[in-house]
Structure formats: C-alpha cells, structure tokens
Amino acid sequence: MVREALQIDQKDNVGIALRPLKAGTLVSVNRRGGDEIRVSLLDDIPFGHKFALRRIQAGEHVIKYGETIGMATQHIERGQHVHTHNVASLRGRGDKR
C-alpha cells in the first residue's frame, strides 16, 4: 500500500501529504505510534502541504512536529487544507505560547 500522508508527532493536529492529493479522497494517515486514521479531504492538497486531522477552531494553535507553528485565523474543518490562507505564523513575533 502506498503511504499517502502522515502525522509526524502524536500531538499534531495536521497531517502531511506525501504526494498530491485530490479533494474527496479518503486518505489513510499513518500516525506516530503505528495506528492510522482516515480523513476525507475537502480540498486538493499539494505534496508536502498540511491538512487538518480534526476541526481546528479560530484562534487555536496549529501543531506540527509536536510544536506550535501558527494560529488558525478561521475555523478549519477536518480534511481542509492548512496553509497561509487560514493560519498566521507566530514565528518572530515574540508572542508567548
């Protein structure tokens, strides 16, 4: 079976596409620890890009590598593309986490 996506850290609320994925695809996400979950994609996801593994509320931290990489600027539904259009970077702002 071809791996389509993965979760890097158990705390992550995003998955990473290991190849370009089309909206409507039911993706099997290999999770850290060996189990897997299935997520139906709402958007096309380019190779290397993120998608939500669960609903992320506006103002909630987006977690990748087990660390905060940004804050959701709007609600992000499970399976939706997670990128600059719906996440604000916190890097270099001096904000406290």
Image (spheres, rainbow, N blue to C red):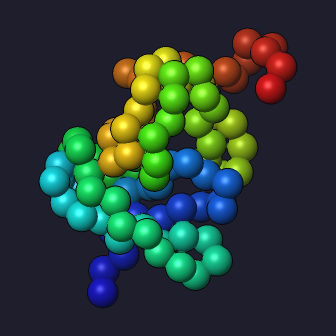
Where is 56 relative to 58, above or below?
below
Q: Position of residue 1 (x, y in %)?
A: 30, 87
- Image-based side of 5 in relation to 88, left or right: left
Write down the quadrant of residue 90 in the picture: top right
Q: Is residue 50 visible?
A: no
Q: Number of numbered discs present?
A: 0
Residue at screen point 26% across, 51% down: 41
- 56 vs 15, nearest the viewer: 56
Q: Is residue 79 above or below residue 28?
A: above
* Residue 65, position as x, y percentages in the image: 66, 52
User: Which percent across, then down, holds residue 55?
Assistant: 45, 41
| Residue 63 location, quadrant | top right
Task: Please give the name of the residue rendered at 36% of the width and 67% of the height, measured from the top-left corner.
Answer: 38
Residue 72, relative to residue 8: is it above or below? Answer: above
Residue at 53% from the left image edge and 79% from the top image edge: 35
Does residue 78 show up?
Answer: yes
- Considering the image in quadrants, where does the C terminus appear? top right
**Left-right relation of 90 to 7:** right
Picture coordinates of residue 69, whole percent (x, y): 63, 34
Residue beneath the point at 33% across and 48% down: 79
Q: Residue furthest bottom?
A: 1
Is 57 in front, or is 5? 57
